[in-house]
Every structure is written in C-alpha cells, then in structure tokens.
Image: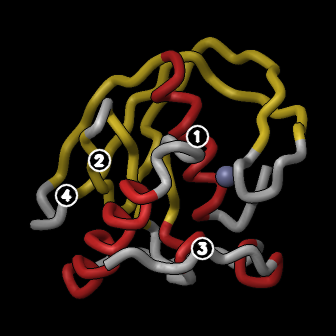
C-alpha cells in the first residue's frame, strides 16, 4: 500500500527501533511507496512513512528491495560531500564512506552481508541516518 510521506520534523528526528518479523507489512508498504516516488527518491526509510522501525528500501533500477535492521559492519574511504534529502531540499555537508560492508535482514529475517560502494553506499548511509533520526 502506498503511504503518505511524513514531513513533520518531530517525527523525522525520532530514532527508529529494531524491526521484527511483525514489521514485514511496513517493509512491503515502504517498497510500494518508494516505487510510487521513484521520480524523486532512490531510497526511503520507514520513518518517512511514519513508522519508527529500522527498515530501508532501495531502488536497483526499477526493482525495489527492503532491508530490515541495516547495520554497517565496516567502512573505508572517508570523504566529504553535500547531500540533499528530497524531503527537505536543503543541501548539507556530510562525511561519507566510499565502501561499506552492510549487514541486514530480509522479510524472512534471514541475514545478508554485502559490500556496497559508490552511490548505493552513499544512499544506504543517508537512509541509516534517517533511522537514527538524523535528517540531512
Ligand atoms: Zn533523506
């Protein structure tokens, strides 16, 4: 189900809690909502649809996948850049890492680990910030 996007700073600045198997519907709604907004967004965090759960969704071409409880295991290649959250449209300086090793769970709570770099790595770092109540 496509959900309405949250723009209220009080909600966006809240920290999300760990997702469980009961949050699979949230993950599904997040995928639907991102799919409906692919013209503006490449990824979304659950807090953006009003759910304080550690779930992110990422577009890979026209496909969207959800990652529950994403966690950066290691990172390298620190750099400074400007980022602009499509929700706010205000460019802000941030420190990011070129390469990250990411651990997450899928909708069946199965764990995955992958090495991400470039745009995907930056996007995931931005979305994990959202899970921590940080809006860039
Ligand atoms: Zn954002």
Of labels 4 and 1, earlier in sequence is: 4
Based on the displayed image, in which of its 4 quarters is residue 126 positioned? top right
Callout in the foreground (3, 4): 3
Q: Is mark 2 within 8 Å of ligand 1?
A: no
Q: Are marks 4 and 1 in contact (CB under 8 Å)?
A: no
Q: Which residue is mark 4?
A: 106
Q: Work out whether 81 lies above or below 11.
A: above
Of labels 3 and 4, earlier in sequence is: 3
The answer for how far apart the CA atoms under marks 1 and 3 are is: 20 Å
The answer for how far apart the CA atoms under marks 4 and 1 are is: 18 Å
Callout in the foreground (2, 1): 2
What colouring does the structure picture have? secondary structure
Residue 5's label in the rendered image is 3
Q: Residue at x 50, y 19 (%)?
A: 99
Secondary structure under the numbered disc 3 in the rendered image: loop
Based on the displayed image, in which of its 4 quarters is residue 94 positioned? top right
Secondary structure under the numbered disc 2 in the rendered image: strand
Callout in the foreground (2, 4): 2
Residue 64's label in the rendered image is 2
Residue 133's label in the rendered image is none
């Amino acid at each position: 189900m496509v959900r309405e996007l949250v723009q209220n700073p009080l909600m966006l600045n809240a920290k999300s809690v760990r997702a469980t198997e009961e949050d699979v519907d949230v993950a599904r709604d997040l995928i639907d909502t991102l799919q409906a907004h692919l013209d503006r967004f490449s990824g979304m965090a659950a807090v953006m649809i009003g759910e304080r759960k550690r779930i992110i969704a990422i577009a890979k071409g026209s496909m969207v996948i959800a990652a529950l409880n994403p966690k950066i295991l290691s990172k390298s290649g620190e750099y400074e850049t400007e980022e602009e959250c499509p929700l706010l449209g205000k460019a802000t300086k941030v420190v990011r890492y070129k390469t990250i090793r990411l651990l997450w769970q899928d909708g069946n709570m199965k764990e995955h680990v992958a090495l991400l770099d470039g745009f995907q790595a930056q996007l995931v770092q931005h979305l994990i910030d959202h899970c921590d109540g940080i809006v860039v």
